[in-house]
Image (tube, rainbow, N blue to C red):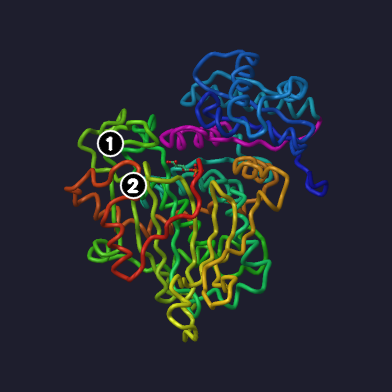
Amino acid sequence: MNSSIKTEPTVFIIFGGTGDLTSRKIAPALYNLFLDGWLPAQYSIIGTGRTKFTDEQFSENLLKDINQFSRSGKADPKKWAEFSKNIHYQVSDINDFETYKEFGKRVEEHNTEWKTQANVIYYLAVSPNFFPIIASNISKAKLAEDPDRVRIVIEKPFGHDLETAKELNKLLSGIFNECQIYRIDHYLGKETVQNIMAFRFANSIMEPLWNRNYIEHVQISVTEQLGVEERGDYYDGAGAMRDMIQNHLLQLLCHIAMEPPVSFNADEVRNRKVDVLKAMRRFGPDDVRMSAVRGQYASGWMQGKEVPGYREEPKVDPESNTETFAAVKFFVDNWRWQNVPFYVRTGKRMHQSASVITIQFKDVPHLIFPTEAAESWQQNRLIISIQPEMSIRLQVQAKRPGLDMVLNTVDMVFDYKGTYTTQPPEAYETLILDTMLGDQTLFMRGDQVEAAWELIMPILSTWQTKKSLNFPNYSADSWGPESAEALIARDGFNWFTLPISKK
Ligand code: BG6
């Protein structure tokens, strides 16, 4: 633990305390923050849900979750006993105003016991339909009065489109100051994503090359082997564009394309990201046809197991028009990036699970080597691997040892595993700690979310009005539909085969 950073007494109230996100992410993150000494001496975790539980039953459930999902493995009984003393549960109906009065009482009890005014974090790990009613009731019960101490964490999806995102922003900003609102995009908490900024802005050697003069194109690829599985009810109303591109992939793009902020201050960093989103080229209906591709997976085999097609997944419309794959060619119209294409793609049931950003540099201006020497010639590439491998590799040409002059591609690699012995924190640990510290750098600001929606709305509208007649159009365990290959091939490029194959 960094001793210069101190968290203050905190009451952490989780709406959706018995839900999947709490089990898999929030509870393990809180426990690991405790193990690493980041939680304050005085804290209280209050889970809330409709099911009746005693504090002990709730805490036992969390223990099971932590044993299953925590990166630190099974909980140590002594540590657990210490940690779980501060776990509570309150059965609640989030539509009922009385519930909120009860929270108010609990916070007051803690304040009296701790002889201080604690920070209060309301974590909304619930379906987005409930965001408005919870926020309104918090306000009605006068639980959001102190902007320095009260914070609200909102999970994605933040809105279903530009209009609903604006409505939600309006409602929240009528109750909270922007500095109290923590909109989660969990990609921003990933160690390797944070490192993009360190790589770009803590080193001087990249900046002179980081522009249209040296970079030919950029590829951002986030592919998953998993299908939609149990999340059909949410996913069928969303699709890959809303679920992944509007948030995670556009944020990755912003990290690559942003100008250097003047400091590592939350608003400075977010201002520069908004600049990128605003500079992105808008799509007209014809551009959508040429620049965006959608796909939906068919049944097939993955790693020796037969898997259903998207339309056969539970809670999915058997005639669904929802895309499980999307690829888009974006441009950032500014001095740094004019006419450099940014190709992004994401999909489920793909051949490999990997999130990778590849920056391909321009070719040398003149090749001095004989053709035979350069048969496996490749332009320089910088490959930022976010997961499962965590690395940055720079691919350069080198002379293969021997008496003749033959060039081949070699990697200069920074690999987390080989460099550090400590296990990196999970994204949720970083984000929850930042919420406690009041640091919004890794959270989405209201205007950022709206700018991202605004950019993709023409694609969503076109896709909604024009049903895709060829769905399903890619098989499980493939690289997506052929039209995605055509999208990039038209410009003379191809999607890079990802160098890592794990998970
Ligand atoms: C979530 C999406 O935001 O991100 C999921 O809703 C997706 O559909 C997930 O699977 C991917 O996150 P990660 O961290 O596993 O890459």
Q: Which residue is mark 1?
A: 299
| Residue sitting nearer the eye, 7 or 342 | 342
Q: Which segment did they paint magenta?
A: 115-141
As drawn, the residue found furthest toward the left would be 469
The N terminus appears in which quarter of the rendering? Answer: top right
Question: Residue 498, percent across and down?
Answer: 46, 55
- The answer to whether any part of residue 227 appears in the image is yes
Q: Amino acid at mark 1?
A: Ser
> Which residue is drawn at the image coordinates 57% and 34% (left, top)?
25
| Residue sitting nearer the eye, 81 or 380 | 380
> Which residue is drawn at the image coordinates 24% and 49% (left, top)?
464
Q: Which residue is mark 2?
A: 478
> Which residue is drawn at the image coordinates 59% and 33% (left, top)?
26
Q: Earlier in the sequence, mark 1 or mark 2?
A: 1
Report whether the residue tagged 2 is closer than 8 Å to ligand 1.
Answer: no
Q: Is residue 330 left or right of residue 11?
A: left
**Which element carries disc 1, helix, strand or loop?**
loop
Q: Give the CA separation, mark 1 to mark 2.
A: 11 Å
**Which element carries disc 2, helix, strand or loop?**
loop
Is residue 127 on the magenta stretch? yes
Question: Residue 381, percent across and down?
Answer: 51, 67
Report whether the residue tagged 1 is closer than 8 Å to ligand 1.
Answer: no
